[in-house]
Amino acid sequence: MKDDFARPEVVAQGVQAEERLQPWTGETKLVGKALPRVDAYERVSGTAEFTCDVVLPDMLHAAILRCPHAHAMVKSVDTSAAEKMPGVIAALTSKSPGADIPFYVPDGPSASPQSLLFDPHCRYEGDEVAAVAARTPYEAFDALKAIKVEYEVLPFVLDEASALKPDAPRLHGSANSMGEPQVMKRGDVGRGFAEADVVLEQTFTTSVQIHATMEPHGSVVRWDGDRLVVWDSTQGVYDGGLFDLAAIFKMAPTHIRVICKYMGGGFGSKAELSKHTVIAALLARQTGKPVKLMLSREETLRAVGNRPEASMTMKAGARKDGTLTALQMTSVTTPGAYYFVEMFGYQVAELYKCANVLVSERAYYTNAGRARWFRAPGFPAGSWALEQTMDMLAEKLNIDPIDFRLRNLTSVSQTEGNKPYTSTGFRECLTEGARVFGWAAARAARKEPGHIRRGVGVAGGVWMAGMGSPPYTAEIRMFADGCVTIRTGVVDIGTGTKTVACMVAAEELEVPLETIRIETGDTAVTPYAQVAGGSMTLPGLIPAVRGGARIVKQQVLPWAAEALGVSERDVVIRGGAFVSRTSADKKKPVQDVFRAHGVMDVVGIGKREPNPTDKVVRPFAAHFAEVEVNTRTGEIRVLRLLGANDSGRVINRKTFDNQVVGGMNQGLGYALTERRVMDRQTGKMCNANLHDYKLPTSLDVAVDHQVVPIDPHDTECNNVGCKGLGEPAHVPAAAAIANAIYDAIGLRPADGPVDPTTVLALLGKQKRG
Ligand code: MOS
């Protein structure tokens, strides 16, 4: 996982090295304010064009036939009847010309693809078998039913215990193991446990969570001769779009255009190219017409990714004074039918100071939908285990959970050779979060004699990416009327990227926010940016935006100063004119100044500068929860949540709060209700719909939800001082809720999600024994 986020660093261009920008030190005019999104009107009025809104002349609609079995070999596919169905224009199978496309290439040098676009070996209920294009979506779905497929149904495995059996059905090659365990080791845990006054051991489990993005996955594809235009609901128009399509179709990247103007959530499930986009492209080529392929809600729950379940056994030791002496995690996960590995144990090795650490993680193939990156892959599960373990240790040592954490803080990155962090606000996340939450009072008041029990919990977290690294490009163009356009190839996946980019450009150029426009997510128009993932977009892109704005200033301010006969510092742009700050009568239209220099616009290309090499950039979080547990019904109500996040400088307080509230509520679902249910008899997913897959609704979330930004005034992470937020806003939330449940009922909710059945089972166990 780690390597996926490590990008090559490039030398910064544009901004001269000798004047590397420093974060603002004084008062900022716009940055830090709570402002509505620049595209708020489009979003709430329905005029924002999402992929599913794209309608092209003569467009066809496609649908995918998926394997209905957990494990099967396709013996034959007959589309002849389907092709005669009303409205059907084309069918596509593994035999169609050009359909022989490899998919799912695992990491590593000896990597070979694990699947084909339509692989005869179907490894889960949902693998793609064939597709059709028809005049309407209904005709397409109807036609799927007329495709005759002969399957050889195979035995399947759903869990690691069965996957490990010598006679277990095999998904790939000769073993169901996804390779050797991933190990992280520091010091000697044996010695650490020997030095401890308290040692405990506990296994924690988490269930499969589905991304459940508001906007389903889908693409609209049009061929213009040998050129390909793709509208895709994607987190990346370049990586995960253009470059992958260019490789698949052996085309020059310049012959491909990928567009994503508005996006309704991805959480990692839209961070790589999906099969459906390629299927739409093949059908469009075959029919010579544009093709739209939007997945159904059911398909999005079954077939485009999930957060895999985990079983994590923790062993931990500490001294009486609260010093951690050893942390050990052994994890097993089943990320489904195709290779995917995540790190549950990174935080075990990074978050708290501990000399002796051992993490060992294994993964096995099962006949289930494949895991994909999902909002801090591995970390919410890792928190579930580590942060409950921290609470168990604190209780054994009779130390307050916050005090215990405070006794084990570190200012260096233990997984990066003990390099210091550029900043860590983790201490303040804990202390300031506790103060605003009213931790001490809530702890003291927590036990109630009746059947409604209240409890409070805390959990800490760190995210291993969230520093943002080159390359990102932002083109800042000032027009002759003084208005400015930002172009950058990022996709605003709903986080508010466009808004914060405009705010930073306006801040740097000292122009009104309304004079800035932004174009994103269109490879024909906008320069390169990385996929919107890893909580990298803000700290990756925004410094490049500021750098580009600075270059514009460097070009136009000397011209303006000369034209007005004042110093550069005295010039400001107002109402399409350069104006002196000190004597307002000195002014000249921007256009006149530009024309005098033979231009009608001035462009600054901002490139993300390299990160410091001697220090490590990490965002931190401490999340707090107060819950009420009904010991008669097992119901859990989350009364209060508080997120204290150190993601450096807050650019927009509104979008910051959006991320923390949204991220923590996704954690609430992970803690209490969200789980994929597989049928052990058939190997099929039972709850591939939003009725039975329980996302939190407005009735479930905490009415009282506070957000406490912790800004450590990081001057070294980048020229803005911001760190990533989207993922650390989610990481410890579920664990905080679990700790609050323990505080309420005195029973450890080790297995998530904790629903009423789990609570009653815990209480029953306690009663019996
Ligand atoms: Mo996020 S899981 O890096 O899209």
Image (cartoon, grey):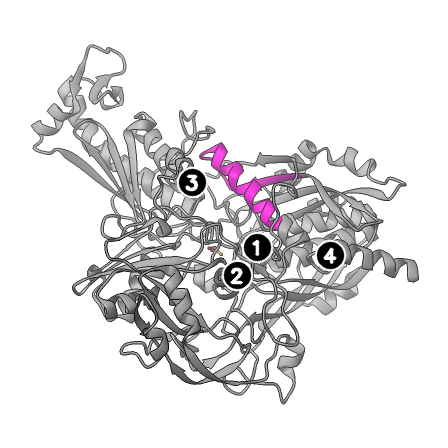
Question: Which residue position holds label 3?
Answer: 496
How far apart in space, not on screen, are marks 4 and 1 (Cα)? 33 Å
Residue located at (55% from left, 55% from top) = 418
From mark 3 to mark 2, how far is it between C-alphas? Answer: 25 Å
Secondary structure under the numbered disc 4 in the rendered image: helix
Measure the alpha-carbon separation of dots 4 and 3: 35 Å
Proximity of marks 2 and 1: CB atoms separated by less than 8 Å: yes
Q: Which residue is mark 2?
A: 301
Ligand 1 within 8 angstroms of badge 4 C-beta: no
Circle 3 or circle 2, nearest the eye: 2
In the image, which disc is placed on residue 78? none
* Kind of residue indicated by mark 2: Leu
Q: Which residues are magenta?
A: 641-667
- Whether residue 224 is situated above or below residue 477 in the rendered picture: below
**Which circle marks residue 389 in the picture?**
4
Between the residue at mark 2 and the residue at mark 1, the CA separation in whole angstroms equals 9 Å
Circle 3: residue type:
Gly
Q: Is residue 360 found left or right of 560 in the rendered image?
A: right
Q: Is residue 107 visible?
A: no
Mark 1, residues whose alpha carbon is within 10 Å: few (<14), some, or many (≥20)?
few
Front residue of 102 and 81: 81
Marked residue nearer the N-terminal end (1 or 3): 3
Residue 443 makes an appearance in the image: yes
Q: CA distance from mark 2 to mark 4?
A: 32 Å
Residue 510 belongs to magenta span: no
Q: Secondary structure at mark 2?
A: helix
From the viewer's perspective, is 575 left or right of 435? left
- Helix or strand or loop: what does disc 3 sit on? loop
Q: Which mark is residue 690?
A: 1
